[in-house]
Image (tube, rainbow, N blue to C red):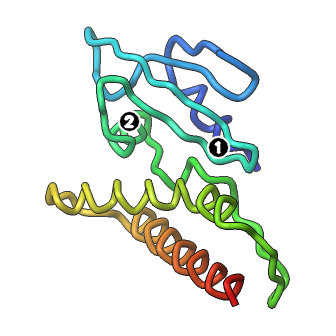
Amino acid sequence: MSRPLDRLLPLLDHVTWSSKESGRAACPAHGRGRKSTLAWRELPDGRVLMKCFADCDVVDVLAAVGLTVADMFPDRTHATPGERFALNARDVLRGIEFDLVVIVQCARCIRRGDVLDAVAWSRFDLAVERVFAAVDSQKGAAR
């Protein structure tokens, strides 16, 4: 199974590496003639974050190369049922940071009147589930 970054990079033009986990490329959402920088970064857990400096929506950037937001996440592995981890609030926020980005991006699409496909809805549902789980984990930690 390939890493999310391995799915993305072959589809981008003018890829340069800034470090072993980050770099830049031409943003594919602009079409020919307009060039803008797309920064990308692979997180330790394999997720890929990206930012277009012309403020292109991540969904549009990925759609331009035939990918979806779900493609930027590694295949999910499941913990043993009932397995719990002790996390502090900072760890929890770091853990759900990208989930919050997914929720906001989906909300922006819906507000624009875009229709989310089944994969996007699935990723949205997963993000919401993870945010609520994070909140629940902190309620238990506060006791």
Q: Residue most toward the front?
A: 143
Residue 48 figure quarter? top right
Graded by Cα atoms within 10 Å as few (under 14), some (14 to 19) or many (20 or more), the crowding at tag 1 reads: some
For this view, does 61 lie left or right of residue 74?
A: left
Query: Residue at label 1?
Result: 4
Callout 1: SS: helix
Figure check: 83 above or below 1: below
Residue 129 x %, y %: 53, 78
Residue 36 figure quarter? top left
Q: Amino acid at mark 2?
A: Val
Q: CA distance from mark 2 to mark 1?
A: 15 Å
Figure check: 10 above or below 140: above
Residue 73 x %, y %: 61, 53
Residue 119 figure quarter? bottom left
Which of the pair 138/35 is nearer the observer? 138
Figure check: 50 above or below 110: above
Figure check: 42 above or below 123: above
> What residue is shown at x 75% (from left), y 44% (from top)?
44
> What residue is shown at x 65% (from left), y 59% (from top)?
90
Do the numbered discs 2 and 1 sit on residues whose CB atoms are within 8 Å?
no
For this view, does 79 lie left or right of residue 110?
A: right
Disc sitting over residue 114 in the figure = none
> What residue is shown at x 66% (from left), y 37% (from top)?
42
> What residue is shown at x 30% (from left), y 24% (from top)?
54
Disc sitting over residue 61 in the figure = 2
Residue 59 x %, y %: 36, 46
Which of the pair 56/2 is nearer the observer? 56
Q: Amino acid at mark 1?
A: Pro
